[in-house]
Amino acid sequence: MHDVGLWLEEINLGSYRQIFKENGVNGEYLEGMSMFTTEQILRFIRRCHMKWGDFITLCKELRRIKVACLKGEQKVRRPWWAPSCLSVLFVKVAKRNRQSRVVSLKLEP
């Protein structure tokens, strides 16, 4: 939870740090958001009292990280939520799976 809070600060969404913590929004949860249905997205926005613009910023930042990893521009490492024993396995799978699904939200140039 600490890493998610720091990351929220870095992307200027630090005002959501406490509410994410209270709602158990961790790295694993954020990573899974790309698979959310519309209903799940709306529920998340309501539960965290997010503004639409802030939610879009969150999605863009999640996508930016994922794309950078897939392109090899960012070092692939275990997610912050995974125990250290999974790091070697995660890196091997991530490197093999560079073509994996990316969040469908488009980034504007």
Image (spheres, rainbow, N blue to C red):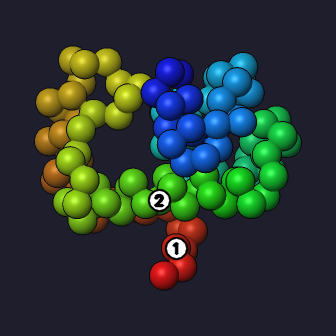
Q: Which residue is under mark 1?
A: 107
Q: Residue at x 72, y 36 (%)?
A: 15
Q: Is residue 47 left or right of residue 34?
A: right
Kindly report the distance in space between the C-alpha atoms of the residues bearing marks 2 and 1: 8 Å
| For marks 2 and 1 on the same chain, the one whose residue lies earlier in the sequence | 2
Count of number-bearing discs: 2
Q: Position of residue 31 (x, y in %)?
A: 48, 43
Q: Is residue 38 left or right of residue 8?
A: right
Mark 2 Cα shell of 10 Å, populated few (<14), some (14-19), many (≥20): many
Residue 79 in sight from this viewpoint: yes
Q: Which amino acid, mark 1?
A: Leu
Which numbered disc covers residue 34? none
Q: Position of residue 43 (x, y in %)?
A: 81, 43
Q: Position of residue 9 (x, y in %)?
A: 56, 38
Q: Residue at x 82, y 35 (%)?
A: 47
Q: Position of residue 78 (x, y in %)?
A: 27, 33
Q: Which amino acid, mark 2?
A: Arg
Q: Is residue 99 above or below residue 83?
A: below
Q: Quadrant of residue 34?
A: bottom right
User: Decide: marks 2, 1 in contact (CB < 8 A)?
Assistant: yes
Q: Which residue is under mark 2?
A: 63
Mark 1 Cα shell of 10 Å, populated few (<14), some (14-19), many (≥20): few
Q: Is residue 73 above or below residue 29?
A: below
